[in-house]
Amino acid sequence: MKKAILSILLFFVLSGSQAQHYSWYAGLSNNVTSLPISGYPQLFYTNFHPGLEGAYNHPLNKNDKNRLHLRVNSSLFYHRFVQTMFSVVPMLNFERKINSMNSIQAGLGLGVALSFENEATFKLKTNGDYKKQFALKPRTQYILQWQFGYSRALNKLKPEGTKFQLLLRTNLQGVFVKTYVPMLPVNTVSAGLQFPLFKDRKQFTGQ
């Protein structure tokens, strides 16, 4: 089974090396702890918890209308009540082209994160006193991530050029607190620009 999955992934990567539309994304985000999907409206009216976003898109097929990408999301955000977190999440991202200017997308991924708690933590010593833990000590967290997005080209004459992109995303982060919050949901809205990298393989290899 593992060999079959690896063979399928290898096929997509090799076939994608001939495809077009390599790109990267940079944006700003707001991040709130709320219920997945149903909590998305809170991103637009509750407290602001800022973040920086980056992503790389590697095409896995040649279909211009229905594109499958290997997308690697990276983010850094500060939630003043909970944590500061840096994450890297590879995902499979499907993009549906509506017309030459507009497209929608959806993706699912699994990755890792480093979480820095924003509250002081203490450890009980043998003599009964408490010792403050090092504030910058991170915790490794696993991230299950899904996202939905909308893209619009900024230039009608170059629809595969720079695009505006709006993303709604959920991180299920764990293990957060084993006893009562094993998975912490963090919703994100991100807005930014997607830039093309290499039009085709000839440009990529310099040939």
Image (cartoon, helix red, strand yellow):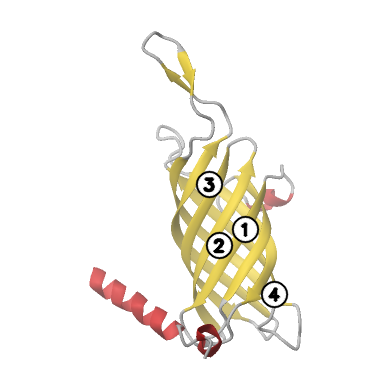
The x, y position of residue 179, in whole percent, is: 41, 32
Q: Residue at x 71, y 86 (%)?
A: 158
Measured Cα–Cα span from mark 3 to mark 2: 13 Å
Q: Earlier in the sequence, mark 1 or mark 2?
A: 1
Earlier residue among tags 1 and 4: 1
Secondary element type, mark 4:
strand
Q: Residue at x 54, y 87 (%)?
A: 200
Instruction: Name which residue type carries label 1.
Output: Glu
Element type at mark 2: strand
- Residue 185: which disc? 3
Identify the disc placed on residue 147.
2
Q: Which mark is residue 53?
A: 1
**Looking at the image, can residue 65 be seen?**
yes
Identity, as a three-letter code, of the amino acid under mark 3: Pro
For disc 4, the marked residue is 163
Foreground mark, 4 or 2, reads 4
Cα distance, mark 3 to mark 1? 18 Å
Q: CA distance from mark 3 to mark 4?
A: 29 Å
Q: CA distance from mark 1 to mark 4?
A: 15 Å
Q: Is residue 136 left or right of residue 141?
A: right
